[in-house]
Image (tube, grey):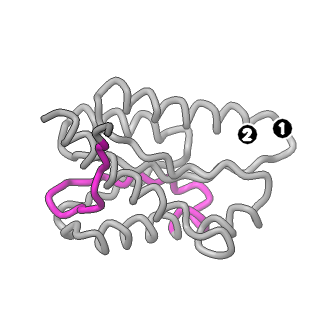
Amino acid sequence: MANKIVGSLDAGPHRFAIIVSRFSDLITERLAAGARDALRRHGAGEGNITEVWVPGAWELPLAVETVAAQKSCDAIIAIGCVIRGSTPHFEYVAGEATKGVAQVSQRHGIPVALGILTTDTLEQAIERAGSKAGNKGVDAAVAAIEMVNLLAQLRK
């Protein structure tokens, strides 16, 4: 039988940063609230959660990079929302924001959970920020908790 390694959902001993885009704050505030709630429900103390707000999704990678380089947290949750418009701006911002946070995770070996919504409409974003489709901020926080615990096991 193969060895199975799975990360637990215990946030208690870990430090987390939630980095949130202010642009589309109608959505991102709900996502950030969901992430905070998920961290607390899984045992994270208030003093182990740092929240950083940036102007928009474009600025997320730089803030995530800076926090990761400081080694002040065990996992980062990137929260943003990019809604498609009638210009190619969506592709540039969404693509670079998601690629940028993924590169930080790989470069620093720290979990960076992707809580950046990329939707076609405001209605789709609202659905993913706490209505019909759940709250993707919660999902990102749970992924961060699981990954930080999984990596702790893998690095033993």
Q: What span is colored magenta in the figure?
A: 4-29
Q: Amino acid at mark 2?
A: Phe
Horizontal side, residue 47 vs residue 146: left or right: left
Q: Which mark is residue 12?
A: none
Furthest residue toward right: 86
Q: Which residue is mark 1?
A: 87
Q: Mark 1 and 2 residues: CB-CB less than 8 Å, in contact?
A: yes
Which residue occupies 31% across, 74% down? 41
User: For the N terminus, which image quadrant?
Assistant: top left
Number of other residues with Cα within 10 Å of mark 1, as a class: few under 14, some 14 to 19, many 20 or more:
few
> Is residue 142 toward the left or the right of residue 83 in the image?
left
Left or right, 90 with respect to 147, comes to right
91 to 80, vertically: above or below: above
Q: Residue at image x 52%, y 56%?
A: 22
At mark 2, the secondary structure is helix
Q: Give me the residue at 46% from left, 32% from top.
A: 102
Say which of 130 and 146 sits in front: 146
Residue 97: x %, y % from top left: 55, 36
Helix, strand or loop at label 1? It is: loop
Q: Position of residue 39 (x, y in %)?
A: 32, 66
Q: Is residue 135 magenta?
A: no
Q: Residue at x 24, y 62 (%)?
A: 10
Q: x, y percentage for residue 16?
A: 27, 54
The CA span between labels 1 and 2 is 7 Å
Magenta segment: does it hold 7? yes
Q: In the displayed structure, does residue 4 sit left or right of residue 54?
A: left
Q: Amino acid at mark 1?
A: Thr
**In this orientation, which residue lies closer to the viewer: 28 or 6?**
6
Q: Quadrant of residue 49?
A: bottom left
Quadrant placement of the C terminus: top left
Q: Position of residue 80 (x, y in %)?
A: 55, 52
Q: Which mark is residue 90?
A: 2
